[in-house]
Amino acid sequence: MPTVTDLIDRLESDATANRTTETTPDVGIIMGSDSDLDTMQGAFDALDALGFAEQTNHAESPEGRFSYESYVVSAHRTPDLMYAYAETAEARGVDVLIAGAGGKSADLPNMTASIAFPLPVVGVPVQEKSVDSVIGMPTGAPLTAVDAGKSYNAALSAAQMLAREHDELRDRLVDLHEERREGVADVSTALHDLGVNGFRDRQRQ
């Protein structure tokens, strides 16, 4: 069973490995507990929709140009792991971080943004009561944040940051946006043409 020390050693070792940016994860997704996984699933869904691959082994990069990694990092139970993750993120090739945390003391996004600076961090309050904690950063210590539970939007924001330097990713974002736009037109037409009851019947099928 791996220990926190083992994981810290892995992160520090990855930080000194000589790899090209094409083989390292572009987005790092961290959460305070595995109980946050359902809320953070939206981030994975958005990145998957944009063609990102999940990187689970830094020695063997997945196919495709863009990838993401994920870890559970608790600001309160494993502060040493939080520091190690944030301090090594840039050296390990990560370009933007998404950090989700719940509870009234949702400190993971804030602390990560402070330690990983100037790497951009998008905070996700896992619960409504976490919003004030996540967005409460002082002047000079920026953190981008989305509304409670909106991890899908957090991933889109991360992709938008990367897209400023990658035309391919920009095109994927535009295509995804257009798909969602046309999806509204399809639903609207069906609701009008089928009527409310007919539309509900179609949804049940």
Image (tube, helix red, strand yellow):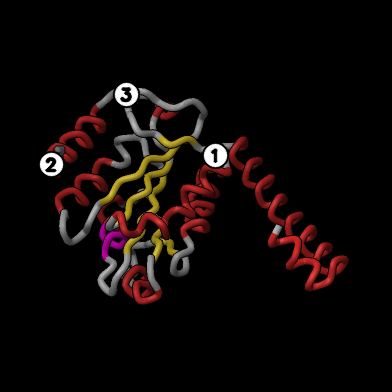
Q: Amino acid at mark 3?
A: Ala
Please state the horizontal and vertical placement of residue 89, each as a whole percent of the image.
Answer: 30, 42
Residue 142 horizontal side relative to residue 82, left or right:
right
> How many residues crowd mark 1 within 10 Å: few (<14), some (14–19), many (20+)?
few
Q: Secondary structure at mark 3?
A: loop
Please state the horizontal and vertical placement of residue 104, each as a whole percent of the image.
Answer: 28, 74
Measure the C-alpha gap from mark 1 to mark 3: 25 Å
Name the image quarter holding the C terminus: bottom right
Please state the horizontal and vertical placement of residue 153, each as a whole percent of the image.
Answer: 52, 58
* Residue shown at 47% from the left, 52% from the top: 43
Point out the stretch of residues depicted in magenta.
Answer: 107-111
User: Disc 1 designates what residue?
Assistant: 165
Question: For residue 200, which quarter of the picture?
Answer: bottom right
User: Disc 3 designates what residue?
Assistant: 59
Question: For residue 54, which quarter of the picture?
Answer: top left
Q: Secondary structure at mark 2?
A: loop
60, above or below 78, in the image: above
